[in-house]
Image (cartoon, grey):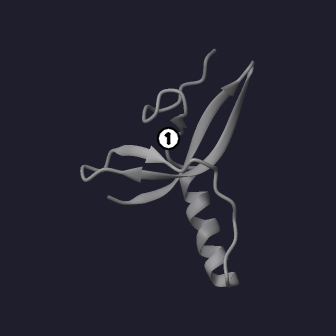
């Protein structure tokens, strides 16, 4: 089991709201959970802070996941 940062989408009324969470994976590499709260950015060194920000930026290139239908991918209502 591993984890990485992923964007999760939540519909709030007529609007979508996006947050970055830690997403956890089962032994087959499928998402099976996420952190209760969205993640903040902090570190004990600038080098480590840059690493965290790079990992967060990388999550923007992955499919967005749905809060309501986790672990399904988010699909915007048209």
Residue 75: x and y, percent? 54, 25
Which of the 4 image quarters holds residue 46? bottom right
Residue 36: x and y, percent? 57, 47
- Compared to residue 8, the image places residue 24 above or below, namely below
**Does dot 1 land on a helix, a strand or a loop?**
loop
| Residue at the top extreme, as displayed | 78
| Residue at the left extreme, as displayed | 28
Which residue is at 38% across, 44% downward?
31
- Which class describes the residues within 10 Å of circle 1: few (<14), some (14-19), or many (20+)? some
| Residue at the right extreme, as displayed | 14
Residue 13: x and y, percent? 74, 19
- Compared to residue 46, the image places residue 54 above or below, namely above
Which residue is at 66% across, 75% downward?
49
Q: Is residue 21 left or right of residue 41?
A: left
- Compared to residue 52, the image places residue 26 above or below, namely above
According to the picture, the residue beneath numbered tag 1 turns out to be 63
Which residue is at 66% across, 25% downward?
11
Which of the 4 image quarters holds residue 77? top right
| Residue at the front extreme, as displayed | 36
Q: How many marks?
A: 1
**Which quadrant is the C terminus positioned in?**
top right
**Which quadrant is the N terminus positioned in?**
bottom left
Which of the 4 image quarters holds residue 71? top left
Residue 51: x and y, percent? 59, 74
């Amino acid at each position: 089991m591993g984890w990485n940062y992923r964007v999760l989408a939540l519909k709030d009324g007529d609007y979508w709201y996006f947050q970055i969470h830690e997403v956890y994976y089962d032994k087959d590499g499928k998402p099976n959970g996420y952190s209760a709260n969205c993640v903040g950015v902090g570190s004990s060194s600038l080098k480590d802070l840059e690493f965290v920000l790079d990992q967060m930026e990388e999550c923007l290139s992955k499919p967005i996941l749905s809060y309501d239908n986790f672990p399904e991918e988010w699909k915007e209502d048209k």
